[in-house]
Amino acid sequence: MRGDRKIEVSPSIISCDLANLGSQVTLCEKSGADSFHLDVMDGHFVPNLTMGPDLIKAVRKATGKRIDAHLMIERPDKYYRNFHDAGSDILLIHYESPVDLRLLFDRMRDESIDYGLVINPETSFSQVKDLIDECKILLVMSVHPGFSGQSFIESALPKVREARKYIDENGIDCRLEIDGGINYENGKKAVEAGSDILVSASYIFHNNISESIGKLLTL
Ligand code: DX5
Ligand code: ZN
């Protein structure tokens, strides 16, 4: 807890042992994970390929916790329903996607589908502040999307600070999330800057899962 903010840990299952998906998800949940982060990459929007809706279905079967699908795909407007129907609770859409975001968000609201907005390291908060009103989450990327295991980009921190201030001053009901290179040290800085939700893949799954989640939860 930070003041009245509950800090949430969201394991990114991209780095889990996929042969033991169900038990890895259960272990995360028992260790205190509040939600799961699923990195969807299409080989176009980012130079890597990962999972599709079927993997989300498999995680859905393993947990009742919230599932956020981070859509690093060229056409979120074309595929968001597939990820929603597969069991995602919140769809995280990139500001940098080549689609009309206002139109997409209007459509998702009409269909009662929850969404969040993601910004890359080169996108400033001021570019997106008018879009976050109805977003459940603003996700600030602290790496260039595409791969787990990259180093944390420090310039994400002032952006988180700026977003925190704006969200609080304007009473906006949008949680602030950070994703990329999060470990205990960077996680601490991110929480101090105002993040509510910490996404982490390598730090959790390449170490002792319970201990890593436990340490992040103390921040
Ligand atoms: C990067 C993904 C991240 C990534 C996190 O494109 O969006 O969620 O998997 O991995 P770590 O925590 O290893 O940086
Ligand atoms: Zn992600």
Image (cartoon, rainbow, N blue to C red):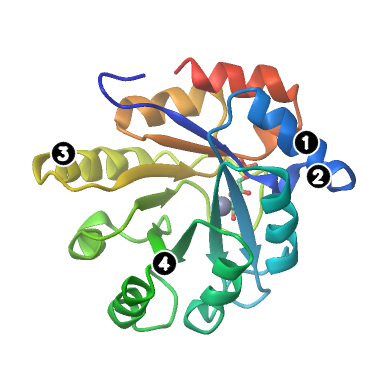
For residue 113, the mark is 4
Residue 170, above or below 134: above
Q: Is residue 210 left or right of residue 9?
A: right
Q: Position of residue 37 (x, y in %)?
A: 58, 48
Q: Which residue is mark 2?
A: 21
Of callouts 3 and 1, which one flags the residue occurring earlier in the amino acid sequence? 1
In-front residue for pair 179/65? 65
Q: Are marks 1 and 2 in contact (CB under 8 Å)?
A: yes
Q: Which residue is mark 3?
A: 168
Q: Which residue is mark 1?
A: 24
Q: Position of residue 72 (x, y in %)?
A: 56, 67
In-front residue for pair 35/143? 35
Q: Is residue 19 left or right of residue 21?
A: right
Of callouts 2 and 3, which one flags the residue occurring earlier in the amino acid sequence? 2
Of callouts 1 and 4, which one flags the residue occurring earlier in the amino acid sequence? 1
Q: Position of residue 85 (x, y in %)?
A: 59, 69
Q: Looking at the image, which residue is at 67% across and 24% down?
A: 30
Give the SS element for disc 1: helix
Instruction: Give the class, few, some or many, for how many residues have Cα within 10 Å of label 1's Cα (few <14, many ≥20).
Output: some
Gap in Å between the C-alphas at discs 3 and 4? 24 Å
Give the SS element for disc 4: loop
